[in-house]
Amino acid sequence: MLDLACGHALVAQLMLLLDDSSQEALAVDVKLPPSASRVAAGLSLAWPRLAGRVALCEARLDSVATSRSDVVVSCHACGSLTDDVLDRAIQARARVAVLPCCQSAGSCDAGALEGWLDPALAVDVTRVAKLRAAGYRVHTQTIPASITSKNRLLLAEPC
Ligand SMILES: C[S@@+](CC[C@H](N)C(=O)[O-])C[C@H]1O[C@@H](n2cnc3c(N)ncnc32)[C@H](O)[C@@H]1O
């Protein structure tokens, strides 16, 4: 499990709680919040099976190796950072799940669709097309808008 642009790494922790078949997670952020390790310690107290299984790493996501067996996740990697996450997953042929935010037709590829679609939607539709062209099976969902208005969930696995 690779949680990129992880912030407090809550997605990594939750993914291990939900899917115990993943042995460990690497959570990567260029600037980890000072409280990330305290949050991890608190979660391990509440769920001892998490202890020692989530490694926090302060690094740029492009410095982290990605392999085919990884599940790459990224929640709200702003703007084109989501594209960097998808590119790394595609390169490795890894499964990937992203919840994008801050899409901008200026810094992201809107696939020339912004004349018809809301620009943020055009960017995400273009991401789906790119993943499909790269041989991925894509699933699109939304999570409740009461959690976040940036709620389009994009899941993809190599065919
Ligand atoms: C909006 S926050 C999302 C944090 C977390 N995933 C969440 O959902 O709460 C975006 C994160 O991306 C990180 N970030 C920005 N550029 C990055 C890079 N090149 N490599 C790794 N992390 C990066 C920031 O430090 C920030 O924590």
Image (cartoon, helix red, strand yellow):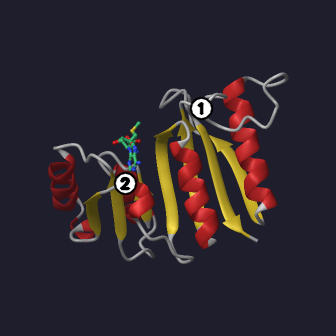
Q: Position of residue 52 (x, y in %)?
A: 22, 71
Mark 2 residue CB less than 8 A from any atom of ligand 1: yes
Decide which of 155, 14 is in the foreground and name it: 155
Q: Position of residue 4 (x, y in %)?
A: 43, 55
- Tell me if 37 is positioned left or right of 70 in this view: left
Up-down relation of residue 78 to residue 119 (above or below) = below
Q: Which residue is mark 2?
A: 60
Residue 61 numbered tag:
none
Q: In the image, what residue occupies the spot 60% across and 55% down?
A: 86
Work out whether mark 1 precedes mark 2 in sequence or the reverse, and give the earlier one.
Answer: 2
- Tell me if 81 is positioned left or right of 47 in this view: right
Q: In the image, what residue occupies the spot 62% across and 68% down?
A: 91
Q: Which residue is mark 1?
A: 103
Q: In the image, what residue occupies the spot 27% across and 46% down?
A: 31
Q: Position of residue 121 (x, y in %)?
A: 71, 31
Local crowd size for mark 2, using a 10 Å CA cut-off: few (<14), some (14–19), many (≥20): few
What is the quadrant of the C terminus in the image? bottom right
Measured in 3D between alpha carbons, the distance from the residue under mark 1 to the one under mark 2, in whole angstroms, is 20 Å
The quarter holding residue 93 reads bottom right
Q: Is residue 90 visible?
A: yes
Local crowd size for mark 1, using a 10 Å CA cut-off: few (<14), some (14–19), many (≥20): many
* Amino acid type of the residue that numbered disc 1 sits on in the rendered structure: Gln
* Amino acid type of the residue that numbered disc 2 sits on in the rendered structure: Arg
Q: In the orientation shown, which residue stands out farthest toward the right?
A: 116
Ligand 1, what quadrant?
A: top left
Up-down relation of residue 42 to residue 64 (above or below) = above
